[in-house]
Amino acid sequence: MGGRTRAPPAAPGQRGAADDRAAHARGGPPRQRLDRARRRRTVHVRRRAARPARVRPRQPERRARPGGAARPGHDRPAGGRGAGPHAGRRGRRARPVRGVPLQRRDGPDHGRTARLHGARLRRHARLRRAAWRGRAAIRARHRARRAVREHAVALRARGARPGAGARAAGPAHAGPVAAPGRGLPAPARGTVSGPKSGRRGGPVTPALLAAALAAAALAYLAFALARLGFAQRLALLVRIPADLSGVLQQASRRYGARPLISLQHPLDWAGPGSDQWSARQVEDSCARLAAVWSLLEVRHNERLALYKANQFDLFLFSASAIRAGAIAAPVNGDLAPAVAARYLESIGARVLVTDLAGYTRLFQNPGVEPPASVGKVVITDAPAAHGRANPAQTLSLPALLALGLPPVAPQPRGADDPVYLVHTSGTTGVPKGVILHSRALVEALRSALLLNFVSRRDTALLAVPLSHQVAQLYLYGMLMMGLPCVLNLDGDPRSILDTLARRRPSLFFAFPSTYTRLTAHGSDACRFDSVRIWATIGDASHAVHQRAFRAKGRFFRDLGIPLPGALFIAGLGSSEVGIAALLRIVTPWTARFGRRVGRGTPLGPRLKIVDAAGAPVARGTAGRLMIKGPCLFAGYWNAHGTLFGASRDGWWFTGDLVRRERDGELSHLDREEDAMHTRLGIVHTLPIEEAVLCAPGVLEVSVFGLRDEQGFDLPAAVLALRPDAPRLPPSILLAGLNAQLAPREQLLFLWVIGLDDFPLGATGKTLKRCLRETYSEIARIGSRQHRLAPHAGRQTV
């Protein structure tokens, strides 16, 4: 019916038909097909059995090795395929295996029996090959040892010592020592020549390679840490004294009379040869000066004011005042005389140490009212002088030292005792006195030791005002490490460039304004191939300076890496913090710039960013920077209201507006008093400055707001051009700069001035308060014609 027809039922005697039907029901082939397959298999097996075995030709004999050693695998017995260790291999004549009977090839289970028999044959063949290889290896080892013994006997017969020239091989050696005139035997198969890579000389495994790489990495890490002085600085951190006077005593005992500090010129009151100072000389001079302050009745915790030129003796006077139990109050010599006089009177200083120039500015200046609190004035570089109607007693420091007063031992100071009274930069008005106690300075010293990647092999060049406590803190740290230090304190960029070329320091430390002046005097053309680290602190440094100076130096070459470049370490801090609150390390591979100031300083204060109500802000949102920690200042002198107004639950508001970026770094946006409140909202000035500095020919810029009659700020800027920049009209400059700024950041006023016309504070920060006072009259006029033309009195083109 179109389908397969069933076979009729078989008769009882018809077994074949029944079998066919059963095979058909199981889905197998009929009996005829099965018979044909069996016959073909039988014929194939019989033909293979009748085929003559192929005889493998005997391998030629190789050259005899010393001692008769042979390479394993070449001493096989002669014969065909069934005679060697590879008998029983597939496709060759199989020999009967003892205990395995041969089955009939035409039986019903012949296929399964043949498979089992083949598996047993292969297993027995593998066992025979393994046994043969083991016996061959044992024979090879015995021959090698016998050759070693025969060679040693031959050497003794000639009178030579077996260990002379070559070490006699023992049983652990992979091969014998070569006899005279003979070659070394080849290593056994499966081994490698050379040093042993395993227990018995196996191949180099990934584990051994990883271990070798790890050992090399550890060795390089140890070298790099030693080159950067980590071990030395960590040891100093463990044994750091509890006060600053103990730091000088420890350095004097450790380094003795070795010169550590080099000056440009000798000190006037110290006599000739005072341009080189050792730690012992520093400690002895502080003891003699402390005796002078005790003679002048400088009592415990009384302020000893210092107002003079930027020289190394500012550090000596401060350290000796702390040794005598007083409070050191250094004042920047570039501070205006009227402002300095008001500040000295606000802190109630009775004794003032100054030079003849400072004395003239304070007490012989008709436009300055001398500080009434000062009763004694010590002049360092001239005999006693008398000013106009000056009730203060004037004394000569050389004459006081000539009295031969006995040295004064360090007075005990507690961790919470004040030791420094430094002033702020004056960005918000008259500088305030910042009280720093002993614990804060010791914690700041710990952080400075940890973050300066230097050792005693390095040389440092400092070009900072020593009236700042951070500069004096660096001197304490370098004396503690025994690091040679060169001081260039006159502030002349040409002199600094000359010192960099002659003394070849590996560490350079200056304020950001110094880097701007170096750029103006041709630092781009200098190599600076000795500098490893460029460091700055105080205000945030510009990105253009970080890019320019990071490409000059040899930080990586000193570590064995053939790449040019140095590290640029920029810290953001203030007098109140004692050390940098934020730190950023710029390398040649740093890609993100702008006004980034990095992250929190190790061993420094804690940080948080909050809104005006004190609540934390989200990442990417501008907020107020607050800090808290043991290195924080103790307060303002006679200005508790200012301290309490900026503090909340022990957290102090620095006055900076920052933003945390997606990668965790902080960007400095502005000072709170410098942010511009425009008609479009709050606009921050520091990002605008970074964008303007990227324009060709711009050397320095300062952006500020001018208040109009409606109470809104109008964006304005003053800038200085590079010496080689083309002199363009300010209107063209303004149009070109606004093309790079966002709509809400557009500048309405622009003045081109000289670099020396920028008003700077005591720490090198630009005083935008003075710029607003100078140019505020134009904003009151508010006419359109002033928006594209600079003020006639300030134009320098």
Image (cartoon, rainbow, N blue to C red):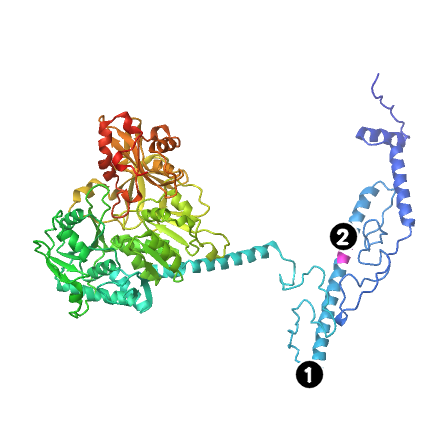
Where disc 2 sits, the SS reads helix
Residue 778 rendering spot, x and y as whole percentages: 24, 31
Instruction: Kindly identify which residue carries mark 1.
Output: 159
Residue 556 in sight: yes
Between 542 and 98, the one nearer to me in the picture: 542
Residue at position x 71%, y 82% in the image: 158
Mark toward the start of the polypeptide (1 vs 2)? 2
Among the 4 quarters of the image, the one containing residue 624: top left
Q: Amino acid at mark 2?
A: Arg
How many numbered discs, if any?
2
Is residue 88 or residue 661 the one in the foreground? 661
Q: Nearer the viewer, residue 531 or 110?
A: 531
Q: Between 293 and 543, which is closer to the camera in this rendering?
A: 543
Q: Is residue 271 above or below residue 561?
A: below
- 1 vs 2, front mark: 1
Write down the region rendered in magenta: 124-129
**If the image is split into quadrants, where does the C terminus sit?**
top left
Identify the residue at image location x=89%, y=36%: 36
Task: Quarter of the image for the N terminus: give it.
Answer: top right
Q: Residue furthest top?
A: 1
Q: Residues within 10 Å of mark 1 (few under 14, many from 20)?
A: few
Instruction: From the top left corner, tell me how far across and down residue 535 is, in percent.
Output: 36, 51
Q: What residue does disc 2 label?
A: 123
Cα gap from disc 1 to disc 2, whole angstroms: 55 Å
Query: Crowdedness of circle 2 by 10 Å Cα count: few (<14), some, many (20+)?
Result: few
Displayed quadrant of residue 417: bottom left
The answer to whether residue 454 is visible is no
Q: Position of residue 471 (x, y in %)?
A: 29, 54
